[in-house]
Image (cartoon, rainbow, N blue to C red):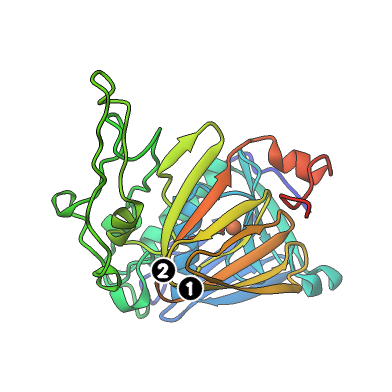
Amino acid sequence: MTMLQETPTVLATEENEQGYREFSLGEFHFRRDEYFVYITWPTGSHVLSADAFLRALQRDVAWAFFYGIVNFDGVLGTVNHYGTVDLFAGRYNDSYRKAELDHVENFPTPQIKTTFEHMLDDWTNQTFDPFAAPRETGSAFGVKNGDNKSAITRHRVAAKRMVGCSDDEPIRSDDTGHLINEHFIDISQDEPEIIAEPGFEDEVKAFSLYTYLSRSDVTWNPSVVSVCKDSLFCPTTEEYILPIIHGNDRVEWFVQLSDEIRWDVADRETGAIRAKVVMRSGDVAAMPADIRHQGYSRKRSMLLVWENADAELPELIATGQTPTYPAEF
Ligand code: PHB
Ligand code: FE
């Protein structure tokens, strides 16, 4: 079932007994208590742990619904149609589909974005940072206890050309307030020496990506550090579990820059397992356009996600004009 919701329905009701507000979006209803988030829709209901829900919600909000599908878990998630967004329950779950318990509603992006932002703000206590690794944050649980607006509204680095260019994001240092993460104290902090021809000082730029990433205070949150037409370099630092299961609508490349990540790769439509991938420092992999994936990183690691931002790709792939894989061997 698909319906386009025309009117804003940021329906936050009164606070519940635990001090949290409840939210409605179309026929979906969201409620949280000390430990859990409860979601209902006309044909079913679902429960998620509050910490996992908030980590996923934080990514969906910060990435403006990302490329393709953001599964919060095997049941709940969003599909980005770049202007509108589907909110679904069970749509990409074989059992829910077969039992006809799945439910999808389509919303204009600003409407679902506003509702999600309010929910994230109201349900994130002052002790919890949804972007942080578990060892770096306090608890998400308990009754309502303040807020953490500065953590949840962190601005995501999105370079126009490249980090370090004069009109762009600064290179990170102690001075910019970015401290070296405990897991990366062995990373060299040297920056490259740039010797530009006179007159080209503003055009020739370089920075150490390892230094840059060693100072990241967020996990599973790719920054855009360079842009060349549709080619985006989106490196990120990873620790614990990718809070969403991403269903690709295009091919993306992974370059493991340090340490190790284990990936579970499953069918995009059904969730059936397709592969287990272990990526160690120096490994390169292409994730096809018909899968979903989730990563696990025991120690903080560095990953370069290479994205193709061409807006025509989802349609070309969905209609079979472009293959779901990047290369023929
Ligand atoms: C992905 O879904 O490809 C993805 C998302 C966030 C990350 C890494 C990979 O931090
Ligand atoms: Fe992905």
- In this rendered view, identify the residue nearer to me: 74 or 302: 302
Would residue 260 be found to the left or right of residue 197 on screen? right
Q: In which quadrant will I find the C terminus? A: bottom right
Query: Label 2 neighbourhood size at 10 Å, few (<14), some (14-19), many (20+)?
Result: many
Q: Position of residue 51 (x, y in %)?
A: 44, 74
CB of mark 1 within 8 Å of CB of mark 2? yes
Give the label on residue 301, or none: 2
- Residue 142 versus residue 82 in the image, above or below: below
The first of marks 1 and 2 along the sequence is 1
Amino acid type, label 2: Ser
Judging from the image, what secondary structure is the residue with disc 2 in? strand
Give the label on residue 260, or none: 1
Numbered marks: total = 2
Q: Can residue 166 be seen in this snapshot? A: yes
Q: In which quadrant will I find the N terminus? A: bottom right
- Residue 296 versus residue 152 in the image, above or below: below
Distance from disc 1 to disc 2, alpha carbons, whole Å, reads: 6 Å
Give the label on residue 278, or none: none
Amino acid type, label 1: Glu
Q: Residue at position x 61%, y 40% from top?
A: 82
Q: Residue at position x 73%, y 50% from top?
A: 327
Q: Can residue 149 be seen in this snapshot? A: no
Would residue 49 be found to the left or right of residue 208 on screen? right
